[in-house]
Image (cartoon, rainbow, N blue to C red):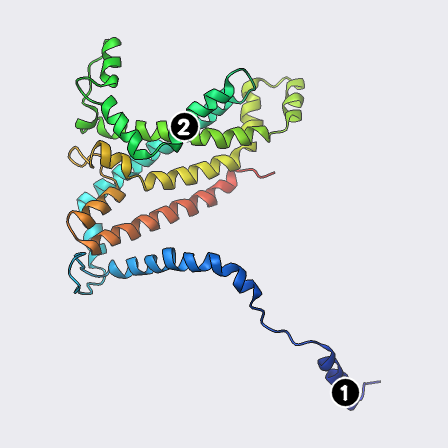
Amino acid sequence: MGVPAAKLKSNKQLLAIKRPRRKLSLTPLLFILPAIIPLIIFWIYPMGKSLYISFTDWDYISPEYDFVGFSNYTDLLTDPGFYSVLVNTVVFSMGVVIPCVAGGLMLALLVSGNGKGMGIYRTLIFSPWVTPTVAVSIVWSWIYEPNVGLANWVLNLLQLPALGWTSSSTWAMPAVIIVSIWKGVGWAMIFYLNALKKVPVSLYEAASLDGASKWRQFLHITIPFISPTTLFLIVITSIDALQAYDQIQVLTQGGPAGSTRTMLYFYYQTAFEEFNMGKATATAILLVVITAAFSFFQFIFSKRWVHYQ
């Protein structure tokens, strides 16, 4: 038998009366406003403004400018000099990221024990990271000094020819990379020290009982367990390398002959030396796109080698 329509209607009215109306609560919004307001002011709005400026010919001084569309992007992508800068950026990034991550892991393995003086060693290795990059670069500029610098003095002791370092288009990029590695390897070491502590000791004991060598234990136990830390370090170190500026400014100013001019330094020169803010912001937008694309693909490919517990 069916339910009478009148009774069904009355039941619906009764449920409507008993069910409280949902009101839009402002409490969650009040909690997130302290985070959203700075995000809008210092990130979202500047990004939007930069994107707009990249479509103009603003010279950074005149209050008037014209909308030129994609002209700045076209000029960049058809300029051979821009691709030279892009290659320098890739070389610098790869030259910093791989040694920093690999070196950080090796140092972490060396100082992970509780032996005498290990805390001092960890502090000394990590200390360059907390030192301002400008100060580090100034010290290394003295080390690289061709005539009285420590670098060439060591080479002379080893009966090797002295190098031009920052004054040589061949050695300037390796010189800047060495400074960046020296500063960043201790930071990677700290993260790996924490990751190594979380690897279960029981797995090593079981592997030893099965006759696995230390090398096989490292490959099949240590590496998989610390892979999330490795992914984090690769992404963050790559972003940091793509944004490198201070060491280049102090050591080489993008030279000699543009051999150390990366995208961020190219942005600086275009904006504050050539006063072409439209082209400079277009460079910055492309750098953001490259950084985001690298991070995205890194996370996609990481599914094959990163193992989460």
Residue 281 drawn at (x, y percent): 25, 53
Question: Which amino acid type is shown beneath numbered disc 2?
Answer: Ser
Q: First in sequence: mark 2 or mark 1?
A: 1
Q: Residue furthest bottom?
A: 6
Placement of 300 over or under 28, stated as above or below: above
Q: Please give the name of the residue rendered at 25% of the width and 17% of the height, measured from the top-left corner.
A: 150
Name the one closer to the observer, 4 or 100.
Answer: 100
Q: Residue furthest right?
A: 1
Res 168 visible: no
Question: Which amino acid type is shown beneath numbered disc 1?
Answer: Ser
Res 283 visible: yes
Placement of 68 over or under 149, stated as above or below: below
Q: Please give the name of the residue rendered at 36% of the width and 40% of the height, measured from the top-left corner.
A: 240
Q: CA distance from mark 2 to mark 1?
A: 76 Å
Residue 197 drawn at (x, y percent): 58, 28
Q: Secondary structure at mark 1?
A: helix
State left or right for residue 134 relative to residue 233.
left
Q: Which residue is mark 1?
A: 10
Hey, which quadrant is residue 97 in on the image? Answer: top left
Q: Nearer the viewer, mark 2 or mark 1?
A: 2
Q: Secondary structure at mark 2?
A: helix
Residue 198 drawn at (x, y percent): 60, 31
Name the one closer to the observer, 258 or 294.
Answer: 258
State left or right for residue 292 relative to residue 110.
left
Q: Which residue is mark 2?
A: 127
Q: Please give the name of the residue rendered at 50% of the width and 17% of the height, measured from the top-left corner.
A: 117
Hey, which quadrant is residue 69 in on the image? Answer: bottom left
Quarter of the image where the N terminus is located: bottom right
Quarter of the image where the C terminus is located: top right
State left or right for residue 12 relative to residue 76.
right
